[in-house]
Image (cartoon, rainbow, N blue to C red):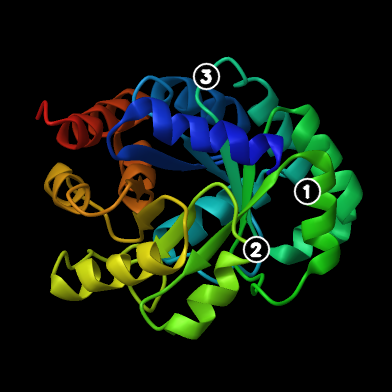
Amino acid sequence: MSDGATRLKRAFAEAGRPLLVPYMMGGFPSLADSRDVARALQPAADILEIGIAFSDPLADGPTVQAAGQAALDQGVTPADVIALAGELRDGPPVVLMTCVNLVLAAGPEAFFRDAAAAGVAGLIISDLPCDEGDDIRAAARAAGVAIIALVAPTTSDERLREVARVAEGFVYCVSVAGVTGGAVSVDDDLRSFVARVKAAIPLPAVVGFGVQTPGHAGTIGEFADGVVVGSQLVRTIEADGAAAAAALAAEMRAALTGDA
């Protein structure tokens, strides 16, 4: 188990409740502003997820795509976001999210060396299948950074067992067969999907994509080990700033702790 995976495992074990994983785009609305956003989100975050913008993202819906493009237009680089993560090592574990091309462009060894030096616990690579990228996984393991696997409702039980062989830290359960930004349907299908994941993969199951309200978070927390809140926070950051995003994150966390 990598050092990053150990830190993530500890976060779940010590909380004893479903975790809140707020998402923000590194460099949005600007690099300086994103520092303020990160600091504002830290008190409510059990794990903080920071996106590294890519010009052709696979899983991002319109809101996150626009935030990423804004960061790219300002010249924000992966190195800038990794440096931002390094400024946050006094807070909850940081997990980055990006696409495989940015890891390959930097070189996996260099990318993960820099991420580990910044204290990054894990990396979500939205377009890396579980049966590809052995060199990337080896570089991450050597540096002590966990590679977080994604699964979707369309993932078969056989495929879940394959994911279990390489997954670390936690498993990201994509709530819909689509992109970020829509509203999640918290129904029997989602419950069944998470149950399948938990039966196949011995890691915490965290649900993301479409979690928009404290009600969503609280209900999902009844059967999952955590929730990711992304597009709704990005919209709030854009409309009302870091303080409003922090308030929304606090409401989400209260729903997970039973204090809402």
Quarter of the image where one finds residue 17: top left
| Residue at x 16%, y 44% (from the top left corner) | 218
x, y percentage for residue 88?
59, 21
Quarter of the image where one finds residue 252: top left
**Mark 3 and mark 1: span between their CA atoms?**
23 Å
Quarter of the image where one finds residue 105: bottom right
Query: Under tag 2, what secondary structure?
Result: loop
Of residue 11 and residue 50, the one placed in the foreground of this image is 11
Q: What residue type is labelled 3?
A: Gly
Q: Which mark is residue 166?
A: 2
Sequence-wise, which precedes: disc 1 or disc 2? 1
| Residue at x 21%, y 53% (from the top left corner) | 220
| Residue at x 37%, y 66% (from the top left corner) | 199
Q: Which amino acid does label 2 sit on?
A: Val
Query: Under tag 3, what secondary structure?
Result: loop
Between marks 3 and 1 in the image, the one whose residue lies nearer the viewer: 1
**Mark 1 and mark 2: span between their CA atoms?**
11 Å
Q: In this view, does 123 lie above or below 54?
A: above
| Residue at x 29%, y 40% (from the top left corner) | 18
Q: Can residue 46 be seen in this view?
A: no
Question: What residue is shown with label 1?
Answer: 141
**Mark 2 and mark 3: span between their CA atoms?**
27 Å
Q: Which mark is residue 200?
A: none
Sequence-wise, which precedes: disc 2 or disc 3? 3
Q: Is residue 152 visible?
A: yes
Question: What residue is shown with label 3?
Answer: 91
x, y percentage for residue 55?
66, 64
